[in-house]
């Protein structure tokens, strides 16, 4: 089907309540940035639709169909369409308009994908995991430390489609930053793809800095005087959250390497160097996560060792006191057998002598145990 046919078909969908109806509502009501968990008051997943020419935002926009038609009649510029958690029905018209591959469309709607870069004809499909640090007053065995989401990017010769999943990862500030650098934005959709990758990796580094504070806090508590009483569930929970962060960060290395080295028609050659820089930052994030994991393993082992040492000290104290108590127990047990003929039973000072022997024996044992560090 020709592009003109696609435009007519999508325009027809708009008459029955599709993209064109949403665009009319967008013109009448304020645009909403879905950085929060609620969906748009418009009842639509469309967050924004903007056209750029020579790196400058044009006053046109709103209706994706009209924006694409005007941009392609001029033969220059590109369209940036942003969506938030679209449904099959909401995304069907977009997929038809931009001739997106069904497999990529399915991944963009369903989410829960690994970071990757795939090429479908002249369109690149990239998946990025987004992360956010969850603030908490105190780390517990059930605390959520890292929250994840996803950003899917379709990049073609004259369009960029971003599909965001999750309650965080708003691209509004990113869009404003790009618009303040027209020279970079003039490089086309690949500049937007790089900016998103750079934004995601910068968030990785920011979250890692916050996680480091939790790791340092746990380390300080474990090696404190009463570190044996620290709940090991807190350390284990932090390791689980670190694993969630690793799943978002580590798999992105291969896609960034491909974007930096493989010649994609959509990616401007000058942008590849920028992807190499992002890959370097990602490598630093990966190394820090690996270091945190090793450190948490060491902290957990040290905590278990301190618990074992504390238990051994308790057992030595119990053993020492049991040995001290055994002296009067033994002597009193002997004289409690009620035989008629026992040494010193009729002696006037026998009772005091026995008590003296018990006291001397107990004091001698107590001093010996103290000298050996058992008490």
Image (spheres, rainbow, N blue to C red):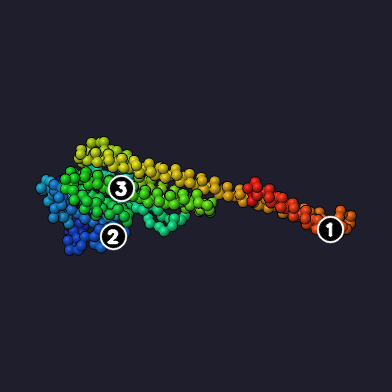
The residue lying toward the viewer, choosing from 252 and 9, is: 252
Give the foreground label among 3 and 1: 1
- At which x and y percent is residue 272? 24, 39
**What residue do we see at 48% from left, 44% from top?**
298
**What residue do we see at 13% from left, 53% from top?**
58
Can you see residue 8?
no
First-in-chain label (2 vs 1): 2
Q: Vertically, is 295 above or below 363?
A: above
Question: Mark 1 — residue?
Answer: 349
First-in-chain label (3 vs 2): 2
The residue lying toward the viewer, choosing from 271 and 229, is: 229
The residue lying toward the viewer, choosing from 72 and 276, is: 276
Q: Quadrant of residue 172?
A: bottom left
First-in-chain label (3 vs 1): 3
Question: Mark 2 — residue?
Answer: 39
**What residue do we see at 49% from left, 47% from top?**
300
Question: Mark 3 — residue?
Answer: 202
> Which residue sits furthest right?
341
- At which x and y percent is residue 35? 28, 57
In the image, 368: left or right of 309? right
């Amino acid at each position: 089907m020709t592009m003109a046919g696609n435009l007519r078909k999508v325009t027809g969908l708009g008459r029955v309540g599709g993209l064109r109806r949403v665009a009319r509502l967008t013109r009448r009501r304020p645009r909403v940035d879905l950085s929060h968990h609620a969906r748009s008051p418009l009842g639509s997943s469309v967050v924004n639709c903007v056209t750029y020419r020579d790196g400058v935002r044009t006053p046109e926009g709103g209706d994706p169909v009209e924006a694409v038609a005007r941009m392609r009649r001029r033969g220059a510029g590109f369209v940036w369409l942003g969506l938030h958690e679209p449904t099959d029905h909401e995304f069907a018209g977009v997929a038809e308009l931009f001739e997106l591959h069904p497999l990529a469309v399915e991944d963009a709607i369903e989410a829960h994908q690994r970071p990757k870069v795939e090429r479908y004809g002249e369109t690149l499909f990239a998946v990025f995991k987004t992360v956010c640090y969850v603030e908490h007053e105190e780390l517990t065995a059930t605390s959520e430390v890292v929250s994840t989401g996803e950003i899917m990017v379709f990049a073609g010769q004259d369009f960029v489609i971003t599909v965001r999943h999750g309650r965080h990862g708003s691209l509004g500030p990113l869009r404003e930053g790009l618009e303040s650098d027209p020279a970079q934005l003039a490089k086309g959709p690949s500049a937007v793809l790089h900016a998103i990758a750079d934004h995601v990796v910068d968030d990785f580094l920011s979250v890692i800095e916050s996680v480091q504070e939790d790791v340092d806090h746990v380390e300080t508590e474990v090696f404190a005087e009463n570190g044996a009483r620290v709940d090991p569930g807190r350390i284990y929970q932090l390791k689980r959250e670190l694993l969630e962060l690793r799943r978002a960060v580590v798999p992105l290395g291969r896609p960034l390497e491909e974007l930096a080295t493989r010649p994609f028609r959509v990616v401007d050659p000058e942008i590849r160097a920028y992807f190499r820089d992002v890959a370097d930052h990602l490598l630093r994030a990966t190394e820090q996560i690996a270091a945190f994991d090793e450190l948490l393993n060491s902290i957990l082992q040290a905590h278990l060792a301190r618990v074992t040492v504390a238990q051994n000290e308790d057992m030595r104290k119990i053993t020492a006191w049991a040995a001290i108590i055994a002296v009067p127990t033994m002597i009193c047990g002997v004289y409690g057998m009620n035989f008629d003929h026992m040494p010193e039973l009729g002696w006037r000072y026998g009772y005091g002598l026995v008590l003296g022997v018990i006291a001397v024996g107990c004091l001698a044992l107590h001093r010996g145990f103290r000298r050996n560090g058992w008490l």
